[in-house]
Amino acid sequence: MIETTQQAAKLIQQRIQRYFKPQTRQRYQIDVVNNIYGPTYNFFLNIQVPQQRERSLPLHRLQVYQLNYLENVITLLQNTTQLTFNFIDFKQLRWPDKQTLIRLGALK
Amino acid sequence: MDYTDEPHGVFFMIDNKSFYASVESIERGLNPLRSTLIVMSEADNTGSGLVLAASPQAKKRFGISNVSRQYEVPVTPELLVVPPRMNLYIEKNLAVNKIFRSFVADEDLYPYSIDESVLDLTRSWRLFGATPLIVARRIQKTIRQQLGLYTTVGIGENPVQAKLALDLFAKHDHELLGTLTYALMPAKVWSITNLTSVWSIGQRTAAHLQRLGIHSMSDLARVDPFELQQEMGVIGAQLFALAWGIDRSQLHELVTPADKSWGNSQVLPRDYLQQKEIELVLREIGLQVTTRMRHHQQKAGCVSLGIGFAHVAAQEDGRSGFSHSLRIEPTDSNRELVDHLLTLFRESWAGQAVRHIAVSYSRLVPNTGLQLDLFQDPQRQIKDDRFERVLDSIRARFGTTALFPASSLLQGGTMLSRAALVGGHNGGNSFD
């Protein structure tokens, strides 16, 4: 069964809620990785406490390897979370709809 | 030594470099050889945390080894800590072996562990390159291109040489390649004095060899094999063959163990002192092993129980634990098997704190039907049997936690928290 963008976004959102326990002086960001070997788009929640080890918790792997699918998922997620998205290994790829460089940041 | 009659093939032993850490690096867009990442299990029974794998850079820069404890790992923002995802590693292992199958026939591939495989390229290497070394490089390149993983290749004329070449040379080689042949054994292997660095020699075997005056591989190669066999049994002869790089195993002839058994063991999340708590876990493990055995339509004729004491209890007692076996009338009844386990436990346990429990069922016989006991109500026996089978089929269809004894909810039960684990560690998200 192919996962819809809504299902994927909901699952990621649920996991963010489970792991994201905001505390002062901690940095949280969502890493979105273009994994060419999957090929998949992988989501991680990175947590950095000053002077501590960085932690990276897996949120989801999108099996549908299409940029417009990813763009939809990101749009849905941005409606529910204010966390920073960090795009990794997207090189010169652009969002199909907005035509901005993906690596420069999220859609909004 | 005359090697004329020994097998002369082309065997590769291929290992994925820091497998779990490499898979996690690639998933995060990092280069596996440059990332400083550790995979840390924080399951209940690992204490504060256990390092399952460390990337080569994490090992080099911070001196972290696999199985390091959480408190031994330096606290620095440069280290990336990630939880294990066993299901993902299994998926990647299958993908790696699929690539191997494009170089050898199915029967010439022998997966050795989650990150190691033996390939018999004797018949196929010429199809892929002018020399085995070129073929090895080609396999490395294919896996790197398709999966991003780095692999280490040991090449030998038989499986044991390939394994030794991998462990002793390839892992330290710049190109991640190592070669060993019969002729190279004296020059490359015999100088080794750290015997435990050699495959199949552990601490105890090494100590035994030391007592016999064997302090290097060269000593081992020059010993009288018959005397060594007399002293150490069949292992003695095997070690002598190892020193000369001799291995006559045929990978395609699968070895069927003489006495197969079903078993499970677990390290408890804390020291268990109360009898009812220990017995609860014992029942849970017993049930799990029975279910697996029944799935294979077998009955057990022998139950074995191993108990490991907690560290302090072991020091006070002088023993690290105990283990006992009991021959029984073959049965697959969970109730009967668990009763036997409890009897074994109660006979030997004298209040020590317990940290490790192992259960196994052996002397297996095929289940050809229910053997009625003359001294019990036959209707009752048939009903009990049918009841257990219904439980089995429900668990087979809906998972092991679909139906479980209410006792597993009591304090001390481990079954529910372990149900989602794979190989004792976090399997990863269920919908990845």
Image: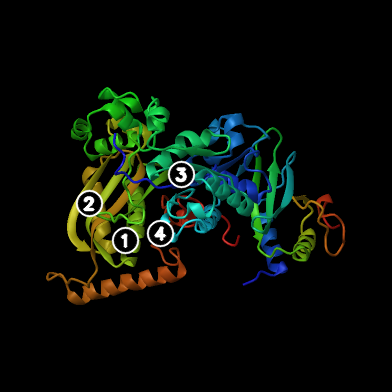
For label 1, the residue is: B290
* Three-letter code for the amino acid on which mark 2 is drawn: Thr
| The quarter of the displayed image where residue B40 is located | top right
Q: Is residue A74 left or right of residue B161?
A: right
Q: Quote the CA–CA distance across marks 4 and 2.
A: 45 Å
Q: Which quadrant of the rendered structure holds the N terminus of chain B?
A: top left
Q: Which mark is residue B45?
A: 3
How far across and how far down the image is residue A79, in percent? 80, 61
User: Which residue lies at the image location 55% right of the left edge and 45% below the top edge?
Assistant: B134
Q: Residue furthest left?
A: B374
Labels 3 & 1 near each other (Cβ < 8 A): no
Residue that mark 4 sits on: B107
SS assignment at label 2: helix
Q: Position of residue A20 (x, y in %)?
A: 69, 50
The residue nearer to you, when weighing A67 against B145, is B145
For label 1, the SS is helix
Disc 3/disc 1 C-alpha distance (Å): 23 Å
Q: Mark 3 and mark 4 in contact? Answer it, CB < 8 Å.
A: no
What amino acid is found at the position of numbered circle 1 in the picture? Answer: Thr
Give the number of callouts: 4
Q: Are marks 4 and 1 in contact (CB under 8 Å)?
A: no
The residue at 60%/60% (across/down) is B432
How packed mark 2 is, by other alpha carbons closer than 10 Å (few <14, some 14-19, many 20 or more), is: few
Mark 3 lies on a secondary structure that is helix
For disc 2, the marked residue is B343
Between disc 3 and disc 4, whose residue precedes? 3
Calculate the distance from the C-alpha at mark 3 to the C-alpha at mark 4. 39 Å
